[in-house]
Amino acid sequence: MSHSPRIGLHLDAAMAAALAAMVQAIGTPSFFDAALDLLGTACAVDSGGAMVLFRHQRPRRLVHRFNAAERKLPEESYLDGPYALDPSYQLFLRGAGSGVYWLRDTAPDDFFDSEYHRVFYSQIGLSDSIDLMLRIDDDTALLYFVERSVRNPAFHGADVAALNLLLPCIAAASMRHNALTHASTPPEVDTLTHRKVQSTIDNFGRSLLTQREREVLFYMLSGYSSALTAGRLQTTEGTIKIHRKNIHRKLDIGSQAELFSLFIKCIPFAAPEQPIDPLEAYQSKPGAAPRTHTPGTPRP
């Protein structure tokens, strides 16, 4: 398979067949596979899929294509909570409209050095990804994602341009498919998982950290540098570095890896709709390491 990008889209036999197959599949269970086939005709991809993003529940995977031999993580590990830190999901929450989004442009500045990237992206053999986000409403979006393996070159600007040319066709067909196959009510487990994830984001460390330190902590987990965090929180880089040191001291951790691991472990212990620190519940379970610090600064 050639990984040289096309400068423009040509309606050759392969492209015409892929377009026809997608149109024919509207309203059928094979629609999303047909849409991915069309995307793969526009630019070479090694893996990809489609999922629905929700503001009030965890994402729902519709189809996922990948090489199992290159993955070191269970497929469901992403949907158990870490999706909340994904640049694509954060983009969705910020209200981004329908469009083509290249990971290189949407990820925080320290994302590729972050623990999130090390634990997830590097463990599933990816070097690059592009998303096609189709906004359904304020709280819902359909997301197609195409990916390149570490075995092959990253995407080029021409790949992004090619997918942008296809976007109107993909969007029209997807919205028609959605209207014909309106999704049923999500399983309660999807809603409960998301509520636990959101509660962990809101309350993790609240028994030890100030409100501002918890804000800084979320940016740390998401792969933001001190400089970019300072810009988001309208303060100085030096102040953010002090907050980071305080977070490490109060949580008794020595690295980003420990912070990320602790955050993920606390998700099952979250109490949705209650201002309770899941860290306390996690550390009180039998066999858990005892807390070695008391609050250095009373929480607000």
Image (tube, rainbow, N blue to C red):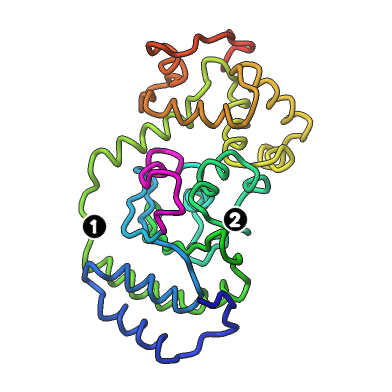
Q: Is residue 38 magenta?
A: no
User: Which label is found at residue 110?
Assistant: none
Residue 199: quadrant of the picture = top left
Q: Are marks 2 and 1 in contact (CB under 8 Å)?
A: no
Question: In the visual, does 119 lie left or right of 176?
Answer: right
The residue that mark 2 highlights is 106
Dividing the picture into quarters, in which one does residue 74 lie? top left
Residue 273 makes an appearance in the image:
no
Q: Is residue 125 visible?
A: yes
- Judge whether 5 appears above or below 131 on screen: below
What residue did someone put label 1 on?
183
Total marks shown come to: 2
Which residues make up the magenta segment? 67-83
Disc 2 element:
helix
Q: Residue at x 66, y 17 (%)?
A: 249
Q: Amino acid at mark 1?
A: Ala
Q: Which residue occupies the extreme front position in the image? A: 69
Q: Amino acid at mark 2?
A: Thr
**Magenta-colored segment: predominant secondary structure:** helix
